[in-house]
Image: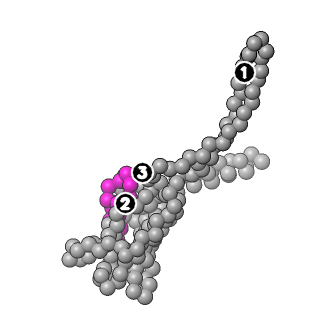
Amino acid sequence: MRHRRWLCAFAITLSGCASASLPYKPESPPSGRALSAAYVLLADRLRVELDTDGYRLEDAQIVRADKGAVRPQTIEHPPAGSGSGAGFGIGVGGASYGGRGGVGVGTGVGVSIPMGGETRVQGNTVLYFALDQIGQPPWRLSVKVSETSPAVIVLPPR
């Protein structure tokens, strides 16, 4: 039984050290963020999946060899949020009125609703670029994620 507990604790520790899961990483990663990307060539578009380490994408573009920038045609943003917004609490209180005492017990559930400025997301962001606008690989994907400096991810030819 003790061996199982140790193994479970070790697995949880390693999962906390996990980095971005996609194959292409930034040339110089932004401080404190694990960004990564993967891509698929479609008939007339380049589909890029971007793991932003749970932070909202603020800007993305492919910088061509002639230094021109091409913005994505479509961006599929993941839903906002950073975990459970529900909470549970129990309260105990006392009261007295005219010489009689009383005890009250209560429960409550709180729900958190993000109100603008939410910087966390649940899942990966997907970008679509027109192939006739971005040229041949390798592509230099410049991304800006909330609360970081811009980073460049090189997407090499396959």
- Asked whether residue 130 is drawn in magenta, I would say no
Q: Secondary structure at mark 1?
A: strand
**Location of residue 82 with respect to 67 vertically, above or below:** above
x 47%, y 49%: residue: 115
x 63%, y 53%: residue: 11
Q: Residues within 10 Å of mark 1 (few under 14, many from 20)?
A: few
Mark positioned earlier in the residue sequence (2 or 1): 2
Mark positioned earlier in the residue sequence (3 or 1): 1
- CA distance for labels 3 and 1: 40 Å
Q: Say which of 46 and 76 sits in front.
A: 76
| Residue 148 in view, yes or no | yes
Amino acid type, callout 2: Glu
**Location of residue 135 with respect to 117 vertically, above or below:** below
Residue at mark 2: 58
Residue at mark 3: 117
Residues drawn in magenta:
143-158
Q: Is residue 41 left or right of residue 70?
A: right
Q: Is residue 107 left or right of residue 147?
A: right
Residue at mark 1: 94
Amino acid type, callout 1: Gly
Q: Secondary structure at mark 3?
A: loop
Q: Which residue is situated farthest in the left direction here?
A: 66
x 34%, y 63%: residue: 59
Q: Position of residue 66 (x, y in %)?
A: 20, 77
- Asked whether residue 150 is drawn in magenta, I would say yes
Amino acid type, callout 3: Gly
